[in-house]
Image (cartoon, helix red, strand yellow):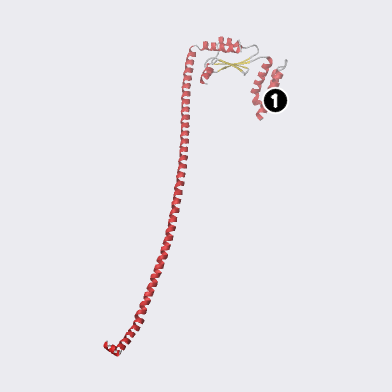
């Protein structure tokens, strides 16, 4: 065994001192490097995990929001459609009412025009008649002025005869 | 209602006066004077014309006589008057009125109820209507 070791050139003392050195370095590295780095890594992993959890949660929330949003949009669409339909119906009713009012006004106006035309016709007729009567009256008066006594006598005779034979 | 009562009283007064005046051998002047005093005391003096007109009508009716009103356009001539008089009997009450509105002719009203109108005014009115 010793021959084998010596054949490989191993110096036990050097080997032991190197081993001690190595162990010392190992212990020092473990305390001052490995543990803090491990701690940092653990914390980082934890943060990443939290981040991922939060991202997943946000994703779920986002999906929920998306669903709610879609529902809201659908609801708003339905409401809009309903409003459009109602407005359409109201507009149609208003249109019908306006049409009716317009027809009524037209009829009223027509009647007023007809009445006014009739009144004017009546006025013209009365005026013509009055003028004609005045003319006849003037003519009669002029005629009577020529022979008033004779005309009076004839008319008196007529009235007296009428009274006698009544 | 009050007017109806007044009208009734007027008719009653006229009827009473006509009844008295239709009797023979009475002092007409005295009766009329007393009647006017009665009207004054009862507050009907304002209605005396109406009462007397009604009395006249009743008296004429009682006597079988007429009240004739001749309404002419102008003053009548003698010839016209003769024609008009042919309608008048003895005892009839005759009134004459001139109304130039008639233009020509005559309007005869007998007992305020019958009317004969041959005036030109009535003819023109007929044209108007």
Mark 1 Cα within 10 Å, few/some/many (few <14, many 20+)? some
Q: Hey, which quadrant is residue B63 in on the image?
A: top right
A105 in relation to A158, above or below? below
Residue placed at 46% from the left, 40% from the top? A96
How many callouts does the rendering have? 1
Q: Disc 1 on helix, strand or loop?
A: helix
Front position in the image: A23 or A48: A23
Which residue is drawn at the image coordinates 44% and 49% (left, top)? A81
Which residue occupies 52% across, 12% down? A151
| Residue at 69% over, 19% down | B18
Quarter holding residue B11: top right
Residue A41 at what x, y percent from top left? 37, 75
- Of residues A52 and B71, the one nearer the viewer is A52
Q: In this picture, is A144 found above or below A75?
A: above
Q: x, y (%) of residue A48? A: 38, 70
Which chain does the residue under circle 1 lie in? B
Residue B122: image location, x then y, percent: 54, 18
For the N terminus of chain B, the image quarter is top right
Quadrant in which residue A54 is drawn: bottom left
Residue B40 makes an appearance in the image: yes
Q: Is residue A86 left or right of residue B26?
A: left
Label 1 sits on residue: B38
């Amino acid at each position: 065994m010793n021959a084998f070791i010596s054949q490989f050139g191993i110096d036990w003392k050097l080997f032991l001192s190197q081993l001690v050195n190595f162990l010392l370095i190992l212990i020092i590295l473990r305390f001052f490097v490995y543990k803090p780095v491990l701690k940092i890594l653990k914390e980082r992993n934890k943060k990443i995990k939290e981040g991922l959890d939060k991202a997943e949660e946000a994703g779920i929330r986002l999906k929920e929001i998306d669903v709610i949003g879609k529902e809201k949009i659908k609801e708003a669409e339905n409401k809009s459609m309903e409003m459009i339909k109602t407005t359409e119906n109201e507009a149609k009713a208003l249109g019908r009412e306006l049409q009716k009012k317009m027809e009524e006004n037209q009829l009223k106006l027509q009647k007023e025009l007809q009445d006014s035309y009739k009144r004017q016709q009546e006025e013209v007729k009365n005026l013509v008649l009055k003028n004609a009567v005045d003319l006849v009256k003037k003519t009669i008066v002029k005629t009577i002025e020529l022979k008033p006594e004779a005309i009076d006598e004839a008319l008196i005779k007529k009235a007296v005869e009428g009274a006698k034979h009544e | 209602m009050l007017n109806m009562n007044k009208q009734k009283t007027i008719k009653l007064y006229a009827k009473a006066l006509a009844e008295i005046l239709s009797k023979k051998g009475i002092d007409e002047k005295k009766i009329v004077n007393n009647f006017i005093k009665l009207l004054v005391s009862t507050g009907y003096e304002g209605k005396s014309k109406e009462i007397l007109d009604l009395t006249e009508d009743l008296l004429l009716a009682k006597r079988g006589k007429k009240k004739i009103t001749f309404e002419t356009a102008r003053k009548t001539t003698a010839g016209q008057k003769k024609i008009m008089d042919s309608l008048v009997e003895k005892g009839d009450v005759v009134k004459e009125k001139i109304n130039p509105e008639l233009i020509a002719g005559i309007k005869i009203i007998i007992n305020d109820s019958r009317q004969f109108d041959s005036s030109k005014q009535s003819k023109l009115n007929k044209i108007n209507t």
